[in-house]
Amino acid sequence: MANSLLAMIPRSRTLNLLIFLACTSIIGVALYMEHVMLLQPCGLCITQRVFVILVGFICLASAIHNPGETGVRNYALAAAAACVAGGYFAGRQIWLQHLPPDQVPACGPGLSYIMENFPLMDLLSFLLKGDGNCAEVSWRFLGLLSIAELSMIGFIGLIVLCLFQAFRKN
């Protein structure tokens, strides 16, 4: 019975490709929401996208490289670290969304305006801290979960897969 269950678990190369495809799908959905549903991403949303893309590229590199056991572990731990960072920013956005209205930070200018008119450090601060725009919930999945909450669930799922990959016995 245990051997048949182990036979169903994909090899590390296949699992890395599946994680890459999951990340590609997540970004595809984010772009659909932005360009078709016309939901404007805030700074924290963009930061979370960067970490999803980073996880995807790390797993794609691992799949292409097809390293030995130590290499698989290193790639998986790097991807897991990116998941933790992305989850932090999703958590920050969830926290902002649940603040009482009088404690929500003021909304700042849009990302394109900041990119054109402010120094790089201000742009990074905007992307890493968020502002009042990040506290706004303009859409909910099935009327329940905000995009940031869905993002957190995605990062949790990705980190579970990455840690499984890092500590699996071949």
Image (tube, rainbow, N blue to C red):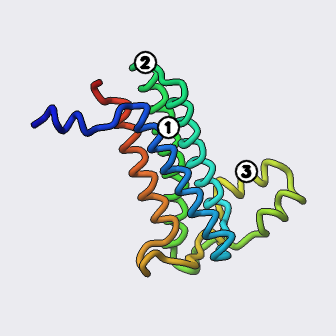
Q: Which residue is mark 3?
A: 124
Q: Quadrant of residue 3?
A: top left
Q: Residue flagged by tag 3: what amino acid is it?
A: Leu
Q: Residue flagged by tag 1: what amino acid is it?
A: Ala
- 2 or 1: tag closer to the N-terminus: 2
In this rendering, position of residue 27 left or right of residue 74: right
Q: Is residue 120 above or below residue 96?
A: above
- Which disc, if any, is residue 11? none
Q: Which residue is mark 2?
A: 68
Q: Label 2, secondary structure: give it.
A: loop
The structure residue drawn at horizontal position 71% and vertical position 53%, both measured from the top left corner, is 125
Q: Quadrant of residue 7?
A: top left
Q: Which residue is mark 1?
A: 79
Answer few, some or many: residues within 10 Å of disc 3's Cα (few below 14, many 20 plus, some between 14 and 19): some
Residue 33 drawn at (x, y percent): 61, 70
- 1 or 3: tag closer to the N-terminus: 1
Which part of the image, by quadrant, shows the C terminus? top left
Which part of the image, by quadrant, shows the N terminus? top left
The structure residue drawn at horizontal position 63% and vertical position 76%, both measured from the top left corner, is 37
In this rendering, position of residue 160 left or right of residue 86: left
Residue 76 drawn at (x, y percent): 45, 32
Q: Are marks 1 and 3 in contact (CB under 8 Å)?
A: no
